[in-house]
Image (cartoon, helix red, strand yellow):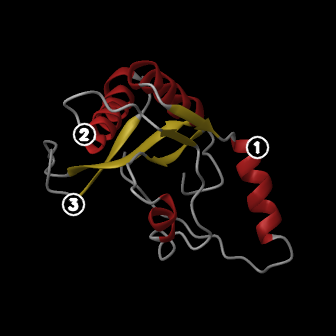
Amino acid sequence: MAFDQLDQKGYGLFKIGMAISLTERIDGYHSYFPTGVYISCILSKIPVYPGATKAHQYKAAETFIHDYLENKTPGVKRIHSTTRSNKMNPEGLGKTDWFYATYLDIENAFVKAQEIFGGNIYVRHLNEVNKDYKKAIAKKPIFVGKIVYNL
């Protein structure tokens, strides 16, 4: 999750994606999310079945979560962008790994993926995120910016 606040409907932007190194992935966001990103859910230690690779199993879990959010969770919208050229929509925009969803939508998708793929699930609730963020910016001057996403 890139922001510490949800909108008036309880929705926010969540990035769903794999990372070989979680630290490197998170550090990569520092240029456009200066205060960082917040880990909401992690599915780790997915068992690798005979004939499959670790990358294949994790990609299958990621694809399942994307599909579950996009096609089986009412109200969730996948963000599309001109920067992506794969899986284009009718407007000529490609699918990203970002979803406009509620925190519970994300948690439910990860729980469903864990039921199917196994592994360990880590869930961090928003009250923890907001507490950490508010502590981090206490006594510091801040600038609040706005990024507009087409839904």
User: In the rendered view, would you say 38 is above or below 59?
Assistant: below
Decide: few, some or many residues near mark 2? Use Cα within 10 Å; few <14, some 14-19, many ≥20: few
Kindly report the distance in space between the C-alpha atoms of the residues bearing marks 2 and 3.
32 Å
Residue 94 pos. (x, y %) = 20, 51
Q: Mark 1 is on which residue type?
A: Asn
> In the image shown, does 107 or 53 lie closer to the viewer?
53
Kindly report the distance in space between the C-alpha atoms of the residues bearing marks 1 and 2.
36 Å
Q: In front: mark 2 or mark 3? A: 2
State the residue position of label 1.
Answer: 127
Q: Name the disc covering residue 61, or none.
A: none
Residue 50 pos. (x, y %) = 24, 27
Residue 57 pos. (x, y %) = 30, 35
Determine the residue positioned at 58% across, 50% down. Answer: 39
State the residue position of label 2.
Answer: 53
Is tag 1's residue or tag 2's residue first in the polypeptide sequence? 2
Kindly report the distance in space between the C-alpha atoms of the residues bearing marks 1 and 3.
34 Å
Q: Mark 3 is on which residue type?
A: Thr
Q: Name the disc covering residue 82, or none.
A: 3
